[in-house]
């Protein structure tokens, strides 16, 4: 794990020091048949932090989350979650965790109120009726508590699922692709809630494919084919990779991409809307290649700070698919 004293752009993580960890596991490994789905995974997450898993489908994100929260027993590795052993005290961990799956996992043929009441009963929530009523009020659904959950829109299903996860006041929230299929407004509101929970000391582990969501996290881990490629503060990842990037705009981008893909110092060329992002780790050679091609053309070029997406593309290009 990198130095956790570094701070991402829009969040104060100076207080998220490693001596106060919600999760601290080493060498987690999970094997299904002949496939090593998670391979020697280390994870340290400070209490109250928002920690993001970024990686392609099948990279081992969900399996890692399930091992951490006690739903799967690792084949190898050890450590603690919320102070409990991940191998021998899984029941204690599950009682203190809220787990929100990618697919809506509540009962669509039960009402909103019945779903919340059922989850509260499972976790033996005290003053259950009052707590369900408070949750309905917070959701703005008090007058619609008898509505079937299956009739809700994607955004409202998401809010209901998150409320159900939090009804027993867990110390750790596990979110597996939580905003898949919801509109941008609902995603914004969802992340506002996650930050509020973080301010209250709730630790969040989230897997996502969205780069604009990844930057919302305090720390990010890139995972590919069961292996952790890199982790650190979200705004420091590109710097840790050592990647430099130039942005090119104008007409003739297809020709520019074709030429620059083989140019000296260029390791990747990616299209971002109406611009090309040309990246590499040899700063001088990269700059020379971009300037030599663009000068005397209608193309405009400028150096920019490398972002998470450029870093992700770069890391994935060097990852080996051990499932093939």
Image (spheres, rainbow, N blue to C red):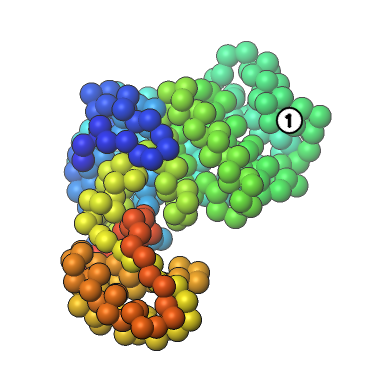
The residue sitting at 35% across, 59% down in the picture is 304
- Residue 286 sits in which quadrant? bottom left
The residue sitting at 29% across, 46% down in the picture is 236
The residue sitting at 77% across, 27% down in the picture is 142
Q: In which quadrant will I find the N terminus?
A: top left
One can see residue 48 in this view: yes
Q: Quick one: 304 or 173, which is closer to the camera?
A: 304
Q: Is residue 264 above or below residue 108?
A: below
Q: Quick one: 132 or 261, which is closer to the camera?
A: 261
Q: Is residue 254 above or below residue 145?
A: below
Q: Which residue is mark 1?
A: 140
Percent x, y of residue 44: 26, 35
Q: Quick one: 154 or 196, which is closer to the camera?
A: 196
Q: Is residue 148 above or below residue 86?
A: below
Percent x, y of residue 217: 41, 41
- Residue 204 sits in which quadrant? top left
- Residue 316 sits in which quadrant? bottom left
Question: Which secondary structure, mark 1?
Answer: loop
Residue at the outermost top position: 127
Q: Is residue 146 left or right of residue 139?
A: right
Residue at the outermost front position: 296
The residue sitting at 47% across, 51% down in the picture is 212
Q: Residues within 10 Å of mark 1 (few under 14, many from 20)?
A: few
| Count of picture labels | 1
């Amino acid at each position: 794990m990198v130095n956790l004293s570094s701070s991402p752009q829009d969040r104060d993580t100076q207080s998220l020091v490693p001596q106060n960890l919600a999760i601290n596991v080493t060498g987690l490994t999970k094997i299904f048949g002949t496939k090593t789905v998670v391979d020697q995974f280390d994870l340290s997450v400070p209490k109250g932090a928002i920690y993001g898993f970024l990686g392609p489908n099948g990279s081992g994100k969900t399996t890692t989350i399930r091992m951490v929260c006690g739903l799967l027993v690792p084949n190898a590795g050890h450590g603690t979650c919320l102070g409990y052993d991940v191998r021998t005290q899984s029941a204690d961990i599950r009682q203190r965790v809220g787990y929100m799956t990618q697919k809506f996992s509540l009962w669509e043929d039960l009402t909103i109120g019945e779903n919340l009441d059922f989850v509260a009963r499972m976790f033996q929530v005290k003053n259950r009726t009052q707590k369900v009523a408070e949750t309905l009020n917070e959701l703005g659904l008090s007058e619609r508590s008898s509505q079937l959950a299956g009739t809700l829109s994607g955004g409202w299903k998401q809010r209901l699922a998150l409320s159900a996860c939090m009804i027993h006041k867990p110390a750790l929230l596990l979110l597996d692709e939580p905003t898949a299929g919801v509109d941008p407004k609902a995603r914004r509101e969802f992340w506002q809630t996650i930050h509020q929970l973080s301010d209250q000391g709730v630790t969040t582990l989230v897997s996502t494919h969205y780069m604009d969501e990844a930057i919302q996290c305090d720390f990010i881990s890139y995972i590919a084919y069961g292996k952790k490629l890199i982790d650190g503060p979200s705004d420091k990842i590109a710097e840790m990779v050592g990647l430099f990037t130039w942005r090119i705009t104008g007409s003739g981008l297809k020709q520019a991409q074709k030429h620059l893909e083989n140019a000296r110092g260029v390791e990747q060329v990616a299209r971002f809307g109406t611009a090309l992002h040309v990246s590499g780790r040899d700063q001088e050679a990269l700059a020379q290649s971009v300037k030599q091609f663009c000068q005397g053309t209608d193309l405009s070029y400028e150096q920019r700070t490398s972002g998470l997406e450029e870093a992700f593309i770069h890391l994935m290009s060097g990852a080996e698919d051990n499932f093939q």
